[in-house]
Image (cartoon, grey):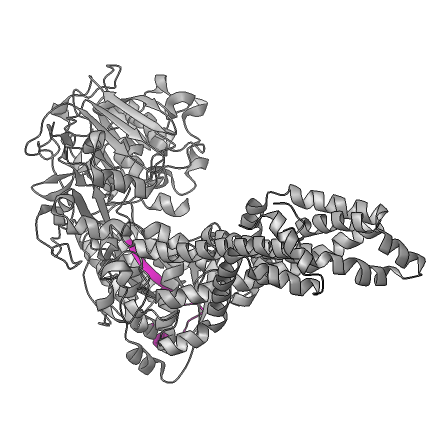
């Protein structure tokens, strides 16, 4: 790990470069950051290219291969052969019971998790920024209202609330004979997570804005006759990008785990949509007969979350070199 | 709750378990082909104690019972679930009960000298109590105590127990005829009569040839009026070989009842000195402990916990484990009901039966250990069941044949399933199989809490859903009228297929009135076939009970309810 002193020295040499460019250079010097960046990119690529890969690999995550071909599973539904039935045909083996392909399940599961996590992070970043900046900048009644709403929302026991509220929300959105479309399920998960998620962003940004708005350049802009909107956009926001980005990079892995936890607890994504949390849940039930089925999604999730957190740390170090560790 | 209380049922047939022999090998078809015994009604000789001792039996020791959940009530008027009955067996004696005589299940007198006698074709039933039966305080059991026990079942506060006796004595609104003994009055003699200390006579409103079966549950046991009260539920007086030392949510300990005389008891041998029930373990934990077989777990059994599928291969693959597994069909028969009020086209219903992937669904549920694939409504455990296979479709389903039946149509099927993990996975298999046969499937997951409320609505808006049934005793009379009588269709009743067919309804009336039980059961089996001709359900599974026990346990068996029987259990050291 480079020490703070070295980085300060490096900063000195970066004077001529733009802040983003120098952040990039600092990031590139952080080996852990680069490695985790590559891993994270690989996960995104896996998620985005899952259908393409599935096409080339010739398997899809919905087909119950083990059911259609009895020789693949034993009579109790467990894959025949070591490592969960891994073979040249099914690279990571088969799912116990239904006999679906584990590799494509995993890739599509990553896709589901990332999609939900990114959507939530995008929404909470936007809402959190808007409310946080408004509260911090305008102060007074706006600050008071935002503060109390945040207090109330933070007082909810999150996980408990998700478990009770998810079925209620899906029940509200469906009626009659219609099957709940996967999009509605995904949408309601995103909605519920976002509803509680924005508070942290708002609080942090409000604090930032509170200190920024007293600074000379803001005062100068005010004296120069700039309107509120212009001040927020041109004076405050450019100084807020760093905290927004840093929070976002730390939020993505957090929401990947929360989404998995919801599915693990049975209120998230349901069959047949592939999902990492549900795979882990199922793995925990069958581990004594098929340890591979538990290890594969668990390790994938562990690696992703660790890599993304390290990436978040590195991003913060690169963007905000003065922040003490 | 509604369904579990109906779960209590009696098995007429046992399938010889793999534990008794057979190499099995790698294939999952572990069980040798069914040896079928129907229950017969025994005589006075079969009802005489002492019970037959199993080979190698010895006295003494403490037996441990590992269970997932506690039995909330010990009061005989509130005991209904199979597990509660199997537990109650140790300290409550009832008028009649089941035992195996030369390998055949036989209904015998437990407190009574024989399984009852009738002089007028089933309307009046007389039971004579055995001599020498005492409560745990030394008081002899009299016919008054039995009558008082029956009066308590009228009490509107005792909701959990079976209600056959009060219903048959006083009609379905029995509570209006008599409110229970709380007010100090007792049932009039023209309902239950006790001419002397050892004789009880029941005067039913209508003839019921199966009354001796209806009293083969703990609610027919004697209760001492002097000891009744609030604490009775937690510590009922004992007539069986054990009495209650301690009972709460986490454990139940039983110690010997010195007043019990083995010479009067044809069913129980009561070798262990003491029983310790431990409640609150997970199914996997129980299975793991019984597999590991360490310390006290050597002397442990479980009444209700099956073998989780992840242990199936291990248990079936290791000879020593397999030898410690009991396996038998239990009274449950499962089917996927087709809502005939919505799916009115017979060919569409036949196509559903043809396309249905029974075997795959069973594999998701754990494979052959889950049960035997069904082709009939009545389980082989039901007396007189006929194992016909009307549609002769492969167990994996035949989409091509189903397409032919559909003749180019693509009907939409609203397939509802309970949102539990196994059902979600089987929904994947079923949806795929039906879609292969050109059905359009609308999947409808319903949360486990609201499942029965939604399903039992008269117009539930659903086409296909899993349902199961088990009768309280092994005759067709407890199955077919309960789930196929079209006149019962209303909110909250159990005609899952919503079948209202005048021909079937008339048959139900005709067969129900037959005085001869054996003949009646044959007719129920024939009616089973007629209902299958109407393609009202897709038969799926005859459920199997698999129970592990520790290596120190001998004489254990699966009882008529599908639970581990403690009646003749002993500890080897």
Residue B561 image position (x, y, % from top left): 25, 43
Can you say whether B183 is above or below A54 in the image? above
Which residue occupies the extreme top position in the image? B138
Question: Which quadrant is the C terminus of chain A positioned in?
Answer: top right
- Judge from the rendering whether residue B488 lies leftward or rightward of residue B353; answer left or right: right
The segment highlighted magenta reads: B333-349
- Residue name at image x 39 percent, y 75 percent: B435
Residue B264 image position (x, y, % from top left): 14, 25
- Residue name at image x 33 percent, y 54 percent: B468
- Tell me if residue B340 is in the magenta stretch: yes
| Quadrant assignment, res A282 | bottom left
- Judge from the rendering whether residue B232 lies leftward or rightward of residue B529; answer left or right: right
- Judge from the rendering whether residue A5 lies leftward or rightward of residue B158; answer left or right: right
Residue B411 image position (x, y, % from top left): 43, 77
- Report the number of discs: 0
Can you say whether A219 is above or below A50 in the image? above
Residue B299 image position (x, y, % from top left): 19, 31
Q: Nearer the viewer, residue A191 or B200?
A: A191
Residue B107 is at least partly visible in this image:
yes
Can you say whether B135 is above or below A303 in the image? above
Q: Nearer the viewer, residue A232 or B379?
A: A232
Which residue occupies the extreme bottom position in the image? B408
- Tell me if residue B526 is in the magenta stretch: no
- Residue name at image x 84 percent, y 62 percent: A229
| Quadrant assignment, res B339 | bottom left
Q: Nearer the viewer, residue A80 or B481?
A: A80
């Amino acid at each position: 790990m480079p020490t703070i002193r070295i980085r300060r020295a490096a900063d000195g040499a970066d004077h001529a470069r733009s802040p983003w460019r120098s952040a990039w250079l600092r990031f590139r010097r952080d080996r852990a950051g680069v490695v985790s960046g590559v891993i994270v990119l690989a996960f995104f690529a896996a998620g985005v290219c899952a259908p393409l890969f599935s096409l080339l690999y010739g398997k899809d995550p919905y087909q119950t291969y083990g059911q259609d071909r009895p020789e693949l599973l034993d009579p109790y539904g467990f894959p025949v052969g070591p490592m969960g039935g891994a073979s040249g045909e099914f690279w990571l083996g088969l799912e116990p019971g239904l006999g679906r392909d584990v590799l494509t399940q995993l890739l599509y599961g990553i896709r589901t998790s990332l999609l939900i996590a990114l959507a939530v992070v995008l929404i909470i970043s936007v809402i959190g920024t808007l409310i946080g900046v408004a509260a911090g900048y305008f102060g007074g009644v706006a600050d008071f209202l935002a503060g109390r709403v945040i207090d109330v929302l933070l007082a909810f026991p999150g996980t408990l609330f998700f478990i009770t509220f998810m079925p209620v929300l899906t029940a509200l959105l469906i009626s009659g004979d219609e099957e709940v479309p996967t999009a509605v399920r995904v949408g309601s998960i995103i909605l519920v997570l976002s509803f509680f998620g924005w508070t942290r962003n708002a609080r942090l940004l409000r604090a930032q804005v509170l200190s920024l708005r007293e600074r000379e350049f803001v005062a100068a802009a005010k004296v120069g006759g700039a309107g509120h909107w212009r001040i927020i956009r041109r004076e405050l926001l450019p100084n807020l990008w760093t905290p927004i980005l840093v929070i976002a990079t730390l939020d993505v892995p957090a929401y990947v785990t929360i989404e998995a936890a919801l599915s693990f607890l049975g209120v998230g994504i349901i069959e047949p949509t592939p999902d990492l949390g549900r795979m882990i849940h199922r793995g925990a039930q069958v581990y004594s007969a098929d340890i591979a089925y538990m290890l594969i999604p668990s390790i994938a999730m562990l690696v992703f979350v660790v890599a993304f957190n390290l990436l978040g740390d590195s991003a913060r170090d690169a963007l905000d070199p003065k922040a003490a560790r | 709750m509604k369904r579990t209380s109906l779960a209590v049922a009696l098995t007429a047939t046992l399938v010889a378990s793999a534990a008794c022999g057979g190499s099995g090998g790698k294939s999952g078809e572990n069980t040798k082909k069914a040896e079928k015994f129907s229950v017969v009604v025994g005589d006075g000789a079969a009802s005489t104690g002492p019970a037959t001792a199993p080979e190698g039996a010895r006295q003494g020791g403490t037996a441990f019972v590992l269970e997932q959940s506690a039995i909330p009530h010990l009061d005989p008027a509130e005991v209904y679930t199979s597990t509660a009955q199997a537990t109650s067996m140790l300290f409550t004696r009832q008028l009649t009960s089941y035992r195996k005589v030369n390998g055949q299940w036989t209904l015998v007198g437990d407190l009574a000298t024989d399984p009852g006698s009738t002089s007028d074709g089933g309307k009046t039933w007389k039971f004579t109590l055995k001599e020498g039966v005492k409560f745990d305080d030394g008081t002899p059991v009299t016919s008054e105590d039995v009558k008082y026990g029956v009066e308590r079942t009228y009490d509107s506060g005792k909701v959990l127990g079976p209600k056959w006796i009060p219903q048959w004595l006083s009609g379905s609104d029995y509570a209006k005829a008599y409110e229970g003994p709380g007010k100090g009055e007792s049932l009039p003699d023209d309902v239950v009569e006790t001419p002397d200390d050892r004789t009880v006579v029941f005067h039913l409103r209508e003839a019921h040839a199966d009354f001796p079966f209806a009293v083969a549950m703990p609610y027919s046991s004697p209760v001492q009026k002097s000891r009744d009260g609030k604490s009775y539920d937690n510590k009922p007086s004992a007539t069986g070989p054990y009495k209650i030392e301690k009972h709460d949510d986490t454990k139940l300990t039983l110690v010997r009842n010195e007043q019990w005389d083995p010479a009067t008891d044809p069913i129980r041998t009561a070798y262990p000195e003491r029983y310790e029930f431990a409640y609150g373990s997970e199914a996997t934990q129980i299975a793991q402990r019984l597999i590991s077989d360490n310390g006290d777990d050597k002397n442990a059994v479980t009444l209700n916990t099956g073998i989780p599928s992840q242990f199936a291969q291990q248990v079936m693959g290791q000879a020593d484990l397999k030898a410690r597994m009991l396996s038998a069909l239990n009274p449950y028969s499962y089917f996927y009901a087709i809502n005939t009020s919505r799916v009115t086209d017979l060919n569409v219903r036949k196509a559903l039966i043809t396309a249905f992937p029974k075997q795959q669904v069973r594999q998701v549920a754990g494979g052959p250990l889950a049960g035997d694939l069904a082709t009939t409504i009545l389980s082989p455990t039901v007396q007189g069941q006929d194992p016909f296979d009307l549609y002769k479709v492969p167990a994996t389903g035949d989409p091509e044949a189903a397409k032919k039946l559909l003749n180019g149509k693509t009907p939409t099927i609203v397939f509802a399933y309970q949102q539990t993990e196994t059902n979600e996975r089987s929904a994947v298999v079923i949806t795929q199989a039906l879609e292969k046969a050109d059905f359009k499937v609308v999947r409808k997951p319903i949360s486990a809490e609201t499942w029965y409320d939604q399903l039992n609505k008269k117009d539930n808006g659903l086409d296909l859903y899993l349902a199961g049934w088990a009768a309280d005793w092994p005759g067709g009379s407890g199955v077919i009228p309960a789930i196929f009588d079209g006149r019962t269709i209303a909110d909250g009743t159990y005609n899952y297929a919503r079948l209202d067919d005048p021909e079937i309804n008339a048959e139900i009336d005709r067969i129900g009135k037959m005085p001869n039980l054996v003949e009646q059961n044959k007719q129920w089996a024939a009616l089973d076939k007629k209902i299958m001709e109407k393609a009202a359900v897709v038969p799926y599974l005859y459920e199997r009970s698999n129970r592990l026990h520790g290596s120190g346990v001998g004489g254990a068996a699966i009882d008529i309810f599908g639970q581990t029987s403690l009646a003749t259990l002993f500890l080897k050291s």
